[in-house]
Amino acid sequence: MQMRVALACLAVVIAACGAPRALSEAATSSPSPSAGSPAPTPPETPARAAVEPLARAVPFEIYLPAALRPEMPVVASLRAAVDPKDVRAGIGDPVLSIEVSAVPGGKPALYLDEGPEGCCPDFGPPVTPKVVVVRTTPTEVRGEFFAAHSTTGGARLRYSETSSSGSKTTIVMTGWSFGPYATEEALLELARSMRGFGRQAPGDTRLMYYSTHVSHSPTGHRISVAIRSGAVPEAARLIDAAGREVSSATFEMPKPNDCLRAAAAVAAMQVIERETQEIARGALRVEVRVSGGAWVPTQLVASNCHSVE
């Protein structure tokens, strides 16, 4: 009888010890497929926590690297894809930008840019890329590796992931020379660990583009927010971290020589100079007043246009 009790206890201990290991291996060992349903990104990763607030605002499948070192701080934001024909328009499709630092408060060690197929062009000096194999199963996926073009410039890997629905997401990884992702092998290891984040329902948040203007006049600084298409809100307001209204403005037609001029409407809010930097750091948020008088939250996309006078 004592022997049977001991064996039963041993079985319980083995089961309890084995379960976390199985979960850990499932979260880190399987590469996301280039077709079919990719394994989900583990919910506890810093990358997922940083990206989750932005996921509803993007129209493409997001992928995150499960092999990313868990102790590295991650910051995510949205920026407008650049239109080479009109940079000042500033309202291209949103691109997800992820910045990974080596240590808290340290310099970035890795950049990830993701967007719809064809986004995220290479803006560095002309470099002939090397064709590399990201993975071979279930189908072969190839990418382009760009060697570092200076002692401080980073090597880059550009390739595309394909979701189960057939849509493609272009991914560009840039690892700087002083960090752990500076080599071809390190970037390929990250790419092979990519997991699909999962599409999110849009919800009530409005997608808005913003630009800043810094003036020689103390009263001339402003933050402009714009809507690209759809129903135009009545007004916009800036809210600080304490929930106080900083500034507000009604929406008007954009001026032909200003940033965001291709938008459907723009609201230009007067601010102090310090606040033109705070919005990029997330210290300020924007709400818009819609028909009926309700104020609703927005998801901000950084434009590629900022002006100084």
Image (tube, helix red, strand yellow):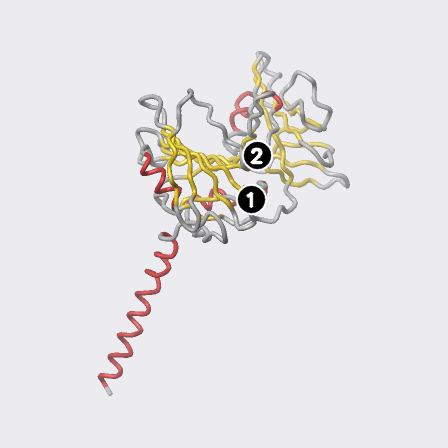
Residue 113 position in % (x across, y down): 47, 34
Q: CA distance from mark 2 to mark 1?
A: 16 Å
Sort mark 2 into few (<14), some (14-19) or many (20+) by Cα contacts within 10 Å.
many
Q: Is residue 64 left or right of residue 119?
A: left
The residue lying at 40 percent from left, 23 percent from top is: 127
> What's under tag 2, amino acid-wise?
Pro
- Residue at mark 2: 94
For residue 219, what is the image quadrant?
A: top right
Instruction: Give the answer, above or below, for where 148 lies relative to 220.
Output: below
Number of residue marks: 2
**Residue 98, x across and y down, in percent:** 45, 36
Nearest the eye: 196 or 231: 196
Q: Quadrant of residue 252?
A: top right
Q: Residue at x 52, y 47 (%)?
A: 163
Location of mark 1 (residue): 167
Nearer to us in this view, 258 or 163 = 163
Where residue 137 appears, as percent x and y from the top left, is 41, 50
- Estimate how packed mark 1 is, as few (under 14), some (14 to 19) or many (20 or more) residues with alpha carbons within 10 Å: some
Name, please, the residue furthest toward the left.
3
Q: Where's residue 91, x and y in %?
A: 61, 28
Identify the amino acid type marked 1: Ser
- Closer to the camera, 202 or 240? 202
From the viewer's perspective, is residue 104 above or below residue 125?
A: below
Q: Nearer the viewer, mark 2 or mark 1?
A: 1
Secondary structure beneath dot 2 equals: strand
Q: Earlier in the sequence, mark 2 or mark 1?
A: 2
Q: Quadrant of the N terminus?
A: bottom left
